[in-house]
Amino acid sequence: MRAIRRVAVCAALMIVFLLPCAGIAQAAEKSAKPPAPDLHAGGVQPSSIPNDATTEVTLPGFHLTGAHMTSGEQCSVVSTTVVSDNEIKMKIKGIRKTEDKDSQCTLTVHTPGGTASTWIVIELTDAEQQEQDAQTRATEMKAAQAFMQRSGKAWHLVFANGATESYTSTGSNDDGAPVFENQAGTSVKIMVSNDNIVMILEQDCMRSGKLAGNQVKNGQSQGACSPPGSWTATVSQ
């Protein structure tokens, strides 16, 4: 019996001593994890590359051993060479689309220790830049035409005191706002937003309301409007 007790005591002592050792070993394993990559040594060199071409670039940093690279939609990493723990050389191709306004392509470093990101500018070619500018002008023109069309060609307003006023379109002014005139030659701006909010602006007076179909039934006036108060309107296209 005494021999059995001695064996049990020894086993218990071994467990007591082994448990701290296991904890120390686990802590050592955690501390052995490689550090995450760090790109504070500088950005991609060069910082911009031409589109539709493959360019060699250098990425300095720290803890880059074992790295591989991924990229965003505007560029593609053709090849990667980890020169040292502090430098990566890559060949990157610009694949930016002309309709893409964002010129920056994200580059992400992946190592066993973690990730880090930077970016490089993808410059459109002259022909692509001209095409993008043409697309921008076409989009702006389409938006301006839609803005003018929403404002209609003629407005007939009825005020709370029974007075009426009619305005006819004369085109737009320098800032693109639709301009209307009454028979006396008084000019007002009448603008209708995408959500059909109506704004009628004249000197020291602002009228607002909601266009439903071709009518405004809830018009209100602010400022030195004459006549003041509520109003309704009918617009013809």
Image: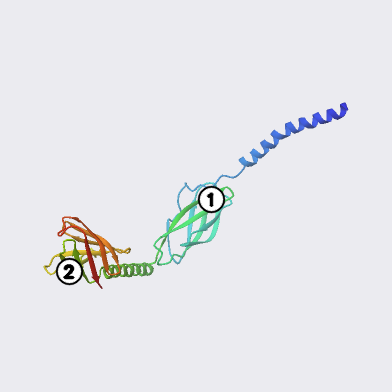
Location of residue 35 in the rendering, given as x and y in whole percent from the top left corner: 56, 44
Q: Which residue is mark 1?
A: 115
Taking the view exactly as shown, the residue that stands out farthest to the left is 184
Amino acid, disc 1: Thr
In which quarter of the view is residue 152 placed? bottom left
Crowding at dot 2, Cα within 10 Å, few <14 / some 14-19 / many 20+, comes out as some
Q: How is the image coloured?
A: rainbow
Q: Give the residue at x 45% y 49%.
A: 42
Residue farthest top in this picture:
2
Quarter that holds the C terminus: bottom left
Position of the N terminus, as image quadrant, is top right
- Graded by Cα atoms within 10 Å as few (under 14), some (14 to 19) or many (20 or more), the crowding at tag 1 reads some
Residue 142 at x, y = what percent?
A: 31, 70
In the picture, residue 153 is in which quadrant?
A: bottom left
Query: Could you say where residue 117 lies in the image, as x and y percent from the top left?
Result: 49, 52
Count of numbered marks? 2
Disc 2 element = strand
Which residue is depicted at the point 64% across and 38% down?
27
At numbered mark 1, what does the secondary structure look like: helix, strand or loop? strand
What separation in Å lies between label 2 and label 1 (alpha carbons)?
66 Å
Which of the two residues, 111 or 149, is positioned nearer the viewer here? 149
Residue type beneath disc 2: Ser
Query: Which label number is shown at residue 166?
Result: 2
x and y, in percent, of residue 219 in the image: 24, 61
